[in-house]
Image: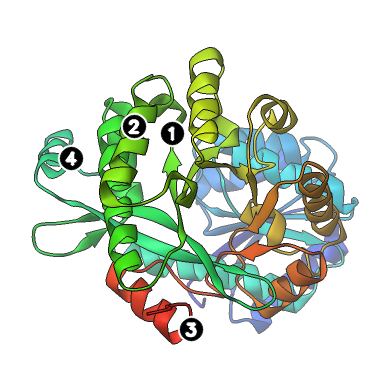
Amino acid sequence: MQDMTVLIVDDDTFITNLTIRMLKKLGIEQVGSAVDGHAGLHAISARKPDIILCDLNMPGMDGLEFLRYLGEDRIESGIILVSGEDKRVLQTATQLAKAHHLNVLGSLQKPIKPEPLKVLLDRFDAQQSGSRRGSITLLTLDTVRNGLQNGCIDVFFQPKVTVPDRRLAGVEALVRWRAEDGRLIPPIAFLPVVEENGLIDELTAQVFQIAVSAAAGWVKDGLNIKVAVNFSVESLNRFDLVDFLIDTAREKGIDPDKLILEVTESRIMEEVTTPLEILTRLRIKGAGLAIDDFGTGASSMQQLKRIPFTELKIDRAFVAGAPTDDEARAMLESSIALAKKLDLSIVAEGVETQEEWDLIESLGVEIVQGYFIAKPMPADELLAWARANGDVTA
């Protein structure tokens, strides 16, 4: 942190001086200040800081207008929002800053305390370390096309366990790319290329076939669980999809009721007729339907009413922080209550801590998925994990 540069944009002299002292105790000596957004923009034009601490309520150019200009200028500094306003205002300002594509590290309520400030500074430091290790480079379209033809698609499986006994209830299939030299390449490096070039159907078909083949192998070894596969909205416009999925599963010896199609609700269809028929036919044939990332889109209630979902997956955004944040907890509780009223199975995604697990358990969630249980793993490792967990019958 010693080489870090910080700009404080705040009209409160006392808070500015207090923050400067905190930063110096953390070893940060290069600290500038500005009394409003205009002065902040002037300071940035002379030297772009690593970190910008921005107050919201200032005379002249306030913090929200300042953030808009930062977004227009594509400023890459780490942004920490600071305010004496209530938490809802601060949360909304944070979302607005992210919408401007700014690197938002987090927010702090006044008076600022050293420990939360250090956490956010450490977050930026970690980002920089990751950047120094090398940024992700997108695969070329030719590489993706060749890879789809030559078996570069790999699938990892993340366990979904029941609460409170932690028995394995199923897995989610997550796509990976295996380069020719054996390296694993993360989805962020190839999914945009796939989606932008009309290759999502081919990718999804391969992921589904690999996942079902893995499930068939597990059944022979005494592990009979549900397998969930993510489906893009773009894949739900082909009437032959139903026969492909059901026939592929049956050919491998997997019953349709062991399949779950996960559809991200924030991207569920605008033209509903074809997808609605496809999803309803799959449901009639026994497959489960999960509404993924629930609560992150604009049409959650409408989609729940339209489509015969069997499972609601609560997004990590509502799980994280819920043990200590009253508003996050209220949103989590309301999602759980809605799912129960609609008689849907509930899966909490992204559970990463004991505190989150304890809260999820106390609220009556049935199934948990996340790093607190296990990371995604190859099919053979999943079987070994299940054996160690006592879930294999043979």
| Label whose residue precedes the other's in the sequence (2 or 3) | 2
The residue to which callout 4 is attached is 144
Disc 4, SS: helix
Disc 1 or disc 2, which is closer to the eye?
1
Taking 125 as reference, is 384 above or below it?
A: below
Disc 2, SS: helix
Task: Please tell me which residue lies in front, 51 or 239.
Answer: 239
| Label whose residue precedes the other's in the sequence (4 or 1) | 4
Q: In this view, does 158 lie to the left or right of 316?
A: left
Whether residue 378 is visible here, answered yes or no, is: no
The quadrant where residue 293 appears:
top right
Residue at the image position 14 percent from the left and 65 percent from the top: 182
The residue to which callout 1 is attached is 232
Q: In 3D space, how far apart are the residues under numbered discs 2 and 3 (Cα atoms)?
A: 39 Å
Q: In 3D space, how far apart are the residues under numbered discs 4 and 3 (Cα atoms)?
A: 39 Å
The amino acid type of the residue labelled 4 equals: Val
Q: Residues within 10 Å of mark 2 (few under 14, many from 20)?
A: some
Q: Are marks 2 and 4 in contact (CB under 8 Å)?
A: no
Disc 2 or disc 3, which is closer to the eye?
3
Q: In 3D space, how far apart are the residues under numbered discs 4 and 1 (Cα atoms)?
A: 18 Å
